[in-house]
Every structure is written in structure tokens, then in C-alpha cells.
Image: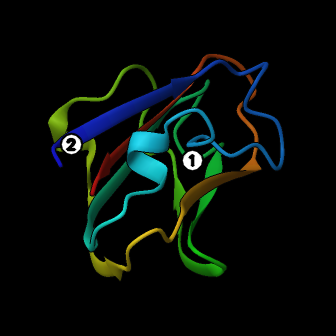
Amino acid sequence: MPLNTVSVAAATAVLGYDMLSTRNDIATAGRNRVLRALGLTGSAAAGDSALDIYVGTVRVATIYNSATGFPSNDAAKFPTAYAVPPSTPISAIVVDAPATNPLNLLIDV
């Protein structure tokens, strides 16, 4: 699967919100997958928002927004190589909500 961007408004990205809840094409699949890279941008200042990334019930990463604004492909700065079994959900849970402006998650699965 290619690099995907998921954008969520600051008013929606409250604590506990799953940024992948509306993207079933990314969150679940009936085949083996590999979580290759992650990136987070947006909000009012770099470092003021965070997501916990889960594969099933296992937290595999906590990422902070590295910049404001909309991301480029270079924003996927957190390389991973985490195997995701078939039908296992991937979640991106907001643990530090943005003050203003949308959050933009880049995910390569």
C-alpha cells in the first residue's frame, strides 16, 4: 500500500480519538501487512501533539508532530518494520490533542 495521509480537524482530534477510525482500508485488511513508516504534522507548534500507534492491542509507537502544516513525503520520519497479521487492526490514538489546526498522519502500510 502506498504512503497515505489522514487529516483530522483539531475539534475532532480529542484525547482518545482514533485517527484511523474512518479509514478501514488502512486500519484493517485480510492479508499480511508491514507498517513501514509514520509521520505526524499539524497543530500550532511542532511537538505539541502526540499519537499512540497500536497494532491490535500492542502499542508499537508514540509519535509527536514534527512540524506544522500539511505534510510532504519527507515527513514520514519514523521508519518501522512492524509486521501486522491479517485482520489485525491498526489504531492511531490521540494522546496529546492539538491546540489548533488539523493533525495530519502519514502512514505507510
Residue 104 against residue 69 in the figure, above or below: below
Q: Nearer the viewer, residue 21 or 104?
A: 21
Q: Amino acid at mark 1?
A: Gly
Question: Mark 2 = which residue?
Answer: 3
Q: At numbered mark 2, what does the secondary structure look like: helix, strand or loop? A: strand
Q: Amino acid at mark 2?
A: Leu
Corner quadrant of residue 2: top left
Residue 34 against residue 65 in the figure, above or below: below
Query: Number of callouts in the render?
Result: 2
Residue 21 on image: x %, y %: 63, 41
- Left or right, residue 91 beside residue 106: right
| Residue shown at 84% from the left, 45% from the top | 15
- Left or right, residue 26 beside residue 53: left
Residue 73 on image: x %, y %: 17, 37
Sooner in the amino-acid sequence: mark 1 or mark 2? 2
Q: Residues within 10 Å of mark 2 (few under 14, many from 20)?
A: few
| Residue shown at 49% from the left, 42% from the top | 24
Label ID, residue 47:
1
Residue 22 on image: x %, y %: 58, 32
- Left or right, residue 95 beside residue 35: right
